Amino acid sequence: MCAAIGLLGMGWFKWNIVSIVALSTWTFTRWTMIAHHTCHGGYDKCHPNKGRWNRFKFAVGSFWRRLCDWFDWMMPEAWNVEHNNRHHYKLSEKEDPDLVENNMRSLRKSEMPLPLKYLKLSVLMVTWKWFYYAPNTYKELKMAKMRREGKSLPAGKWDPEDPVTFQEILSGQNPFYSMSEFFAVVAGPYFVIHFLLLPLPYLFIGRYMGLGDTLYLNALVNLFAAELLTNFHAFFAVVTNHAGDDMYRFRKSCRPFSGSFFLRQVLASAAFDMGTDPIDFFHGFLNYQVEHHLWPSLSMLSYQKAAPQVQAICAKHGVPYIKQNVFWRLKKTTDIMVGTANMKWFPLEYENKFLAIDSVAPAGTQLDSKKEE
């Protein structure tokens, strides 16, 4: 419905608020509610169409599948590696590619005035999907391929955990791929089809009606505005999940689905307001972040059902379950990004103690991390 409202109305006048919001929501929910949970395997067992709604088939394998299933700035195969594997099984460790405190080190350490930091951050909020996420997920895909093939990572003065952004690509500091490869394989197809070809019917309609290129240009303006809005919306729902002065970081890796693993998913994740379909829809069902990290392969409805039980278990055992309004989490996240606050380090004594217990305790019965890649 959002796609129909947005596409059918975007050409008739500039700054069409209804079309802009609809187009933005279409892009947001296509990622956060459909692709995100499907790529995690949330519908592997419950959807009748196993040939499409399966983590190993959805949006991967060909450009046609990407176009039909989940077409965005990020390459689905790259996102699956970066998010489903690296982020979920290295949560809040230095190897976590989504660790905000690590990724924002340059801004945090910068001596620029605080207002300028917030200005720079504001620009990032409305551009982050193509500026940061698409390049960095593709970097993780290239690194994963090199590891599988037994190749050494490129030599040079760089840290494998440092993010690759559009800035590194432009400056030639990215050792994994060229600008031409990034445009041809990752970002270019989306840019051309979504921003140039998608509004093309309005060019023909406008000229047929004697309006010249007006309708086409109107559509471009509304698509551009929707792009800014959907980046901002996604920043709220996605980036704020694991950052804040009440979130923990960890020094060592743990075994997937061990006691330490489950504890870390709670201590390093923040849930938002939840419980009704409109609220959950606005958050893209990412407001159940604790539950999602405990059981990545559940469906959206299952998270609604699990949340009260998880909160009760955490309260019973004295484990802090963080649940706050998304706008307050945004404030905590931006504080980390500009360097006015720091995340907590989990006490090394307890980290070692729990890892020692894990070494002699049986692991959980969930799928191992390799199944998520």
Image (cartoon, rainbow, N blue to C red):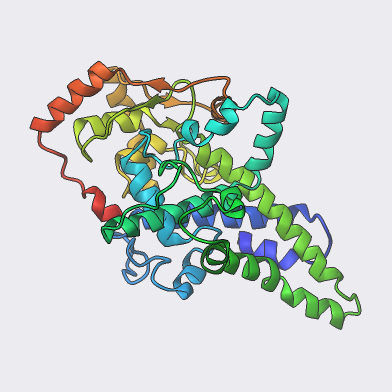
Q: Quadrant of residue 111?
A: top right
On the rendered structure, is 304 left or right of 44?
A: right
**Residue visible at 19% across and 24% down?**
354
Q: Residue furthest left?
A: 360
Q: Residue furthest bottom?
A: 208
On the rendered structure, is 145 left or right of 33?
A: left
Pick the residue in front: 112 or 19. Answer: 112
**In this picture, is 311 found above or below 284?**
above
**In this picture, is 9 found above or below 136?**
below
Pick the residue in front: 346 or 226. Answer: 346
Quarter of the rendering occupied by the N terminus: bottom right
**In this picture, is 330 found above or below 28?**
above
Whether residue 218 is visible, yes or no, is yes
**Residue visible at 38% across and 29% down?**
268
| Residue 174 in picture, x, y percent from top left | 51, 52
| Residue 99 in picture, x, y percent from top left | 44, 36
**Residue visible at 33% across and 33% down?**
265
| Residue 238 in picture, x, y percent from top left | 51, 41
On the rendered structure, is 150 left or right of 197?
A: left
Q: Quadrant of residue 205?
A: bottom right
| Residue 226 in picture, x, y percent from top left | 69, 54
Whether residue 299 is visible, yes or no, is no
**Residue visible at 66% across and 54% down?**
227
Q: Residue furthest front?
A: 156
